[in-house]
Amino acid sequence: MTNSKYQTLGEFIIENQREFEYSTGELSRLINAIRLAPKVINHKVNQAGLVDIIGGGETNHSGESHQKLDVFANEVFINALTNREIICGLASEEEEEKEDDYISINSLAKNNSNKYIVLIDPLDGSSNIDVNVSVGTIFSVYRIKTPIGSSVLIEDFLQEGTEQVAAGHVVYGTSTM
């Protein structure tokens, strides 16, 4: 336990990882990647009224307009999670128009032993950004059901909540939490 009254997410992860005998650090690296992306997104959210990042664009499957911040947040999370080669699949609310509704990530490593997938809404509530209402990121992490090393399938993303390994919500505003 840290001596400070406050504990960072990084300190929490390191401290609690030791309690799991079979911990490999893979989930910790995944959470750290998720921790990085909101820092970048928060910077843009706080600039939303000052730079050309608010407003709509194309229409999604629900008939809603893709907000520029939605597209930006989605790209940030995809880059943060795929460039580190720590997940084997990603399902994003912003990718629902695609053929498979998810992104299969084939690691460049020869021995692809990644075992987690992430489901995410990169910027929930972005249509409220123009009226200064808090927005956020919602994410969920699951272990894959398909054999490790093979391509993910839709079944990997359609699991019950009791199978969830980790989940969280980041709230952006004057104070990001």
Image (cartoon, rainbow, N blue to C red):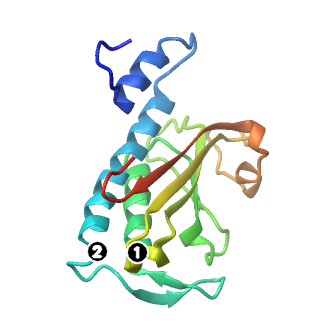
Amino acid type of disc 2?
Ala
- Residue 58, x across and y down, in percent: 49, 89
* Badge count: 2
Quadrant location of residue 29? top left
Tell me if I can see residue 148 in this picture. no
Residue picked out by circle 1 = 129
Looking at the rendered structure, the secondary structure element under dot 2 is loop
Q: Quadrant of the N terminus?
A: top left
Looking at the rendered structure, the secondary structure element under dot 1 is helix
Tell me if I can see residue 68 in this picture. yes
User: Residue at position x 48%, y 57% from top?
Assistant: 137
In the depicted structure, whether residue 87 falls above or below residue 125:
above
Amino acid type of disc 1?
Ile
User: Residue at position x 72%, y 49% from top?
Assistant: 156
Dot 1 crowding, Cα within 10 Å, few <14, some 14–19, many 20+: some
In the depicted structure, whether residue 28 falls above or below residue 52:
above
- Residue 32, x across and y down, in percent: 39, 38
- Residue 113, x across and y down, in percent: 55, 34
Judging depth in this view, the residue of 47 and 159 nearest the camera is 47
User: Residue at position x 41%, y 24% from top?
Assistant: 12
Residue picked out by circle 2 = 48
Label pair 1/2, CB-CB below 8 angstroms: yes
